[in-house]
Image: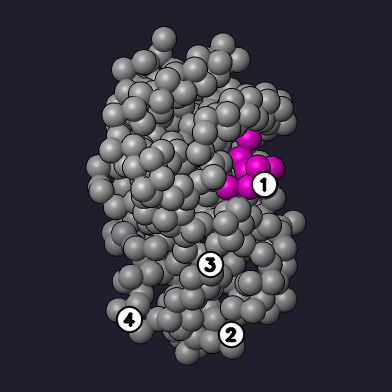
Amino acid sequence: MNIYLDNAATTKMSQTAIAAMLPYMDGIYGNPSSLHSAGQKANEALTSARERIATLLGCEPREITFTSGGSEADNQAIISAAKLGEEKGKKHIVSTAFEHHAVLHTFEKLKKAGFDITLLDVHENGLITPDQVTDAIRPDTCLVTIMYANNEIGTVQPIAEIGAICRERGVLFHTDAVQAIGHLHINVKEQNIDMLSLSAHKFHGPKGIGVLYARKGIRLTTLIEGGAQERGKRAGTENIPAIMGMVAAMEEACAKIDENAVKLTALRDKLIAGLSEIPHAILNGDEKQRLPGNVSFCFEGIEGESLLLLLDDKGICASSGSACTSGSLDPSHVLLAIGRIHDVAHGSLRLSLSAENTEEEVAYIITAVKEVVEYLRSISPIWRDLVAGKKEFVIK
Ligand SMILES: *Cc1c(COP(=O)(O)O)cnc(C)c1O
């Protein structure tokens, strides 16, 4: 058995995406800024890629900037909005406590520059309400940035409602949609989204390439200085092979959103039902308002790291939460944000599915997780205390 269940960390590239890249590594390798025919062929590809991405997002090609991925897009969106705000004396930003570190760490920089950041509390079900956003907006708010879908617990926020509130109040609205693109239907105009980040390697495209959509009229701040590529907003020779792979993967994923959602939701709900049979286990995040392929649990009395290693021995690649914090002993800031206490947050497991996973795999995983959790508890002193009544169970 070799089962990959870590698609929120990264995905296997689709054959369509690989095939779309090859011509641009071999025959059509020109620099799109060159005036000769080889360069112009590459430039035509770039232009068409931009148009195709714009069509998928429901925006105009000139509103698309290619970046090195989701992290860079998040950084650039937030820094740009902060700069625009600062020019008008507005130095307040609204966000949530469980954003990706690409967002949270950018705030640390802005705080040093005198920005005030309000991080909304996330409810235990992993959701925030539009009312929380309304209440948090102040006259000096320059940006609201809230992730579309959480990368650890998969919860999906009411993005269109939040967008409408921001539009009405004249505040820029950015969303990190890295986990949502290719899984949920998104239209930036209909949903009142001013800025959006996406990353190709989360939907079976190549790593190291992404997009920042910014509504026209929003002046982006340049993070990478150099040539005049991307309308002067992102210097560096465009990564045409990766861009072509990203477009192909995005078109493929978006065309299959409904079909994949039906399949993944069925697998997800089977996993949730199976793992819920484990005593003192709890699902993280709302049961319904979550990504079709996300399953996240906490099991009391075990260490997530040991669980992962033993599952790996059984051929299962899973995660305890975010790949970015693996290797650190701090519990996930996402799980802490939804109110899990440290001990419980340490016993977490995230399974993120792709359309390649099967029912047989799901059955195997449920059995494997049950066995491993039982084994780890049998050797855990904490579990012994819990069972002996010396400590109280947090998860009933
Ligand atoms: C993966 C991820 C990112 C970072 O994207 P990269 O392309 O790896 O830089 C940002 N936000 C979310 C929600 C993610 O899942």
Q: Is mark 3 within 8 Å of ligand 1?
A: no
- Indicate whether 147 appears above or below 91: above
Badge 1 amino acid? Gln
Mark sitting on residue 121 = 3
CA distance for labels 1 and 2: 28 Å
Does residue 84 appear in this view? Answer: no
Residue 287 shown in magenta: yes
* Chain part drawn in magenta: 285-292
Q: Which residue is mark 1?
A: 289
Residue 266 point in image, percent of width and height: 68, 25
Residue name at image x 68 percent, y 57 percent: 158
Q: Earlier in the sequence, mark 3 or mark 2?
A: 3
Q: Please state which of the two labelled residues, at mark 3 or mark 4, is closer to the viewer.
A: 3
Q: Which residue is mark 2?
A: 138
Q: Mark 1 Cα within 10 Å, few/some/many (few <14, many 20+)?
A: some
Q: Which residue is mark 4?
A: 113
CA distance for labels 3 and 4: 24 Å
Q: How many marks?
A: 4
Residue 154 point in image, percent of width and height: 55, 44
Mark 4 and mark 2 in contact? Answer it, CB < 8 Å.
Answer: no
Foreground of the two, 339 or 246? 339
Q: Mark 4 Cα within 10 Å, few/some/many (few <14, many 20+)?
A: few
Badge 4 amino acid? Ala
Foreground of the two, 35 or 360? 360
Q: Earlier in the sequence, mark 1 or mark 3?
A: 3
Q: Earlier in the sequence, mark 1 or mark 2?
A: 2
Residue 360 point in image, percent of width and height: 56, 11
Residue name at image x 50 percent, y 46 percent: 395
Q: Please state which of the two labelled residues, at mark 3 or mark 2, is closer to the viewer.
A: 3
Badge 2 amino acid? Arg
Q: Secondary structure at mark 4?
A: loop
Residue 128 point in image, percent of width and height: 62, 62
